[in-house]
Image (spheres, grey):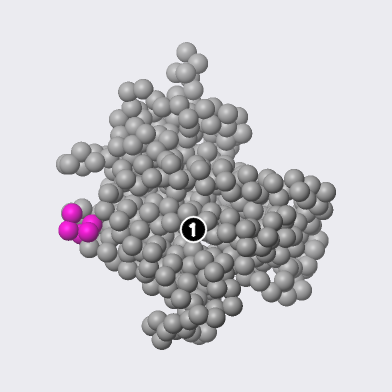
Amino acid sequence: MENVDAIISKIDELVWGVPLIVLIMACGITLTIKTGFLQFRKLGTALKYMMKEEEGGHGDVSSFGALCTALSATVGTGNIVGVATAVAAGGAGALFWMEIAALFGMATKYAEGVLSIKYRVTDREGNILGGPFYYIENGMGKKWKWLAKIFAFFGVFAGLLGIGTITQINGITAAVQRFFDPQSQNTVNIFGIEKSICTVIAGIVITVLTAFVLIGGIKRISRIAQVIVPAMIVLYIVTCVFILIMNIGEIPGAIAEIFESAFGLRPIAGGLAGISVVIVSARSGIARGIFSNEAGLGSAPIAAAAAKTKEPVRQGLVSMTGTFIDTIIVCTMTGLVIVIAGSHTGDLSGVAITADAFGKGLPLPETVSSLILMVCLSVFAFTTILGWNYYSERCLSYLIGASRTKTIIFRWIYIAAVFVGPYLTAESVWGIADIFNGLMALPNIAALVALSDVVRDETKGYFRRIKE
């Protein structure tokens, strides 16, 4: 298993090297310039559109429902466990680079939303279909259909083996086991691996719930997401804000540590310093940030395409708020709580880092703080499993054609992946997720750059009509 982990780690480092990081950042910067720094100028408008339904729109779900479906897939373990692993690997400075990536990523997410509506199609059964494969094929031209197929291929496996299933269920079961059986005193042998019985039970329960919800498709997922996601985000944010208020005197020091680490002024794990710190910190922050908010991955526009709207720019603005909520708000609060507690500097890993920070920050018994974190993480991760099933199903349909039989077979395979997720190592889980995320991003980034003038023209045209 150690050899497998080492191989996965090497591939992860190769995929998420400096070239991909530069490419993703350059895409966000390019779109920011071409849209006139729209994510800063029109954030207020975007937040208003998020809550106000458009009249006369055509689609499968409301704009808010589409956003909640996208948020259900983005707000997950990345916000709790991903931030922890980022600051543990790249120091507190990783949080700074996560924020920078998110600010430019808002322009990327905006462009994805615009293109998803502009180039979406309706199938024979009346279902609305959209996403990178359609804006690659219909926007860049039929000769680029091979690039759309590549995106769809990596999208299937990102959902099936990475961000959609294994990382999420692994995060849930780790949190449950830490709460109910932290010393792993009650174990059973599954697949030749000794696991806490709490891990096994949690895995089975989540698998059954996943199977129940997936039968209902996008509309059931959307209905559940519109209720659960906002409630859990509010609960998590309120908890983090309370911790920050209780430790308000530590915030300036934490911010100073974040900036010092981001620019190589403070060593991180392994004694790295200087330019090495900047590279490791930037890589960790950007990779985990993209894992969390998915800007540039091309996943969110698959959900955005189903929105009831007739204006691409309007939906682009709504989509943009997803990155703002996910990273600028939720991830920032998680990171600050961890840095203030200093939980990232010890020997802890994964969810244990965030749990330790919550335990130190909340003036409550450790069991209560662990319970709050476990509930938030479990719900976030569960809704991510649901959202990514929809994404990967759409990718599969584009790749091999849509049919009810194929969809049902894939759903059971997806459910099986959820079931086996708890029995894989955390290192392998996050490595596999990073690899497929990076490979999935490449064709999407290429399309966004190629169609950036279309995004610019759509943006100018929309706001000119609004002004007139």
Q: Nearer the viewer, residue 354 or 115?
A: 354
As drawn, which residue projects farthest toward the top?
A: 468
In the picture provided, is 298 more to the left or to the right than 340?
Answer: left
The residue that mark 1 highlights is 378
What type is the residue that disc 1 sits on? Answer: Ser
Q: Give x and y (percent) for residue 136.
A: 35, 47
Q: Quadrant of residue 38?
A: top right
In the picture provided, is 150 more to the left or to the right than 355?
Answer: left
Q: Is residue 59 above or below residue 359?
A: above
Residue ID at (27%, 40%): 128
Bin the neighbour count of mark 1 within 10 Å (Cα to Cα): few under 14, some 14-19, many 20 and up. many
Magenta span: helix, strand or loop, mainly?
helix
In the picture provided, is 374 more to the left or to the right than 215?
Answer: right
Question: How many numbered marks does the figure carry?
Answer: 1
Q: Nearer the viewer, residue 141 or 3?
A: 3
Q: Is residue 43 magenta?
A: no
Q: Give x and y (percent) for residue 253.
A: 82, 53
Q: Give x and y (percent) for residue 209.
A: 35, 58
Residue ID at (72%, 60%): 360
Q: Nearer the viewer, residue 362 or 311?
A: 362
In the picture provided, is 85 more to the left or to the right than 57?
Answer: right
Q: Which residues are magenta?
A: 404-408
Q: Is residue 358 above or below residue 65?
A: below
